[in-house]
Amino acid sequence: MHDDTPPANDEGLRARIAEMRQEHQDLDAAVEALESLPMPDQLQIARLKKKKLGLRDEIQRLEDQLTPDIIA
């Protein structure tokens, strides 16, 4: 059998996913901190939330690359 994805590439993807998950958590903490302010900047909060959604989508895309296609 031939594996199209070399193991090093899988490890690189896993490392990138871990970095992105950490960034997602950092953005979540930043949003919570901004929301706790007496007069939160709603525009900045919206931008951070949009960035979080983009990260989540990218993480999902990378995880899908790690999962082999199984034909049922």
Image (cartoon, rainbow, N blue to C red):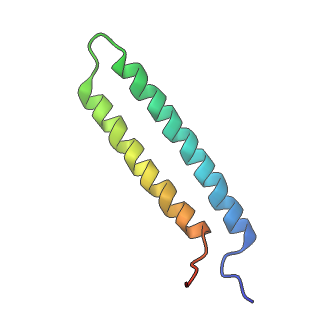
Q: Is residue 5 left or right of residue 1?
A: left
Which percent across, then down, holds residue 22? 57, 40
Which percent across, then down, holds residue 64? 53, 66
Q: Residue at x 28, y 35 (%)?
A: 46
Which residue appears farthest toward the front when viewing the image?
Answer: 72
Which residue appears farthest toward the bottom when viewing the image?
Answer: 1
Which percent across, then down, holds residue 13? 63, 60
Seen in the picture, residue 43 relative to 9 is either above or below; the reply is above
Q: Quadrant of the N terminus?
A: bottom right
Q: Residue at x 66, y 81 (%)?
A: 4
Q: Quadrant of the C terminus?
A: bottom right
Q: Quadrant of residue 43?
A: top left
Which percent across, then down, holds residue 67? 60, 69
Q: Quadrant of residue 51?
A: top left
Q: Is residue 18 left or right of residue 37?
A: right
What is the tally of numbered marks visible in this picture? 0
Residue closest to the eye, 72 or 54: 72
Q: Residue at x 67, y 76 (%)?
A: 5
Q: Residue at x 71, y 61 (%)?
A: 11
Seen in the picture, residue 65 relative to 59 is either above or below; the reply is below
